[in-house]
Amino acid sequence: MNALNQQVLRTDMAGMPLEWIDFQEAVKLYYLGQVGYTCGSPLYRVHGGINAASGRRSIIEVHSIVATEGNTHALIKARADYVPPLNNRALFARDGHLCLYCGEHFAISDLSRDHVRPLSRGGRDQWNNVVTACRRCNNHKAGYTPEEAGMKLLAVPFVPTHAEYVYLRGRRVLADQMDFLLAHFPRSSPLRARVRRRA
């Protein structure tokens, strides 16, 4: 994997995880003086131009975690009632790319979003009513509840916190980034045990 493809974890000055950014955005934050401090390991060095007066070349060393000043929305995301946006990529990651009916792992292209209580029966398209299902199980369940379809749900759907959502949106989370995010997971997080098993 190209080192420049590695995402940087951006936080606010209080250490609240905010989002993943690419190396261009990270370098821009360094250049604008908006990086208050860094954590984690150095990811890469970006060489800039040569200063005409000093003859010195600028170098920016980008770390895996950067705390930034400015617009954060962190207080909103830290609230207990904050609900991150629902999307299939994060949903499938929440459920470990596992069909929560048959228990098999599948590629993203073979997964679908299933509404535990079907929309046609008053169910909602929200985190605590959706699970990852393979296409076969989703088609078999159709417009029924799991009980009516004779299917067992292997895990209870839950709403991820903002820190969990940031983790779920990461493409390749490094060990130091994962440790940082885990510190922000609730102790009762269903993701905590799974993440620790991978480490």
Image (tube, rainbow, N blue to C red):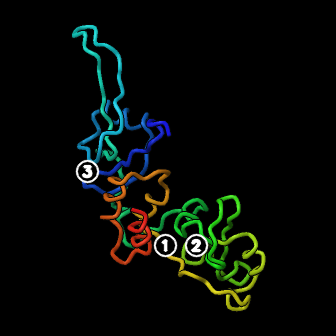
Q: Residues within 10 Å of mark 1 (few under 14, many from 20)?
A: many
Judged from the image, the secondary structure of the residue bearing numbered disc 3 is loop
User: Mark 1 or 2 closer to N-term?
Assistant: 2
Q: List the residue tagged with mark 2.
A: 126
Mark 1 and mark 3: Cα distance apart in space: 26 Å
Query: Which corner quadrant holds the C terminus?
Result: bottom left
Q: How crowded is mark 3: few (under 14 residues within 10 Å), some or many (20 or more)?
A: some
Nearer to me, 53 or 175: 175
Residue visible at 27% across and 34% down in the picture: 33
Residue 54 image point, x, y percent: 21, 10
Dots 1, 3 in contact, CB < 8 A:
no
Dots 1, 2 in contact, CB < 8 A:
yes
User: Mark 2 or 3 closer to N-term?
Assistant: 3
Q: List the residue tagged with mark 1.
A: 159
As displayed, is residue 4 above or below residue 145?
A: above
Nearer to me, 126 or 49: 49
As displayed, is residue 72 above or below residue 162?
A: above
Residue 134 image point, x, y percent: 69, 70
Mark 2 and mark 3: Cα distance apart in space: 31 Å
Q: List the residue tagged with mark 3.
A: 13
Q: Mark 3 is on which residue type?
A: Met
As displayed, is residue 89 above or below residue 172?
A: below
State left or right for residue 43 relative to residue 150. Answer: left
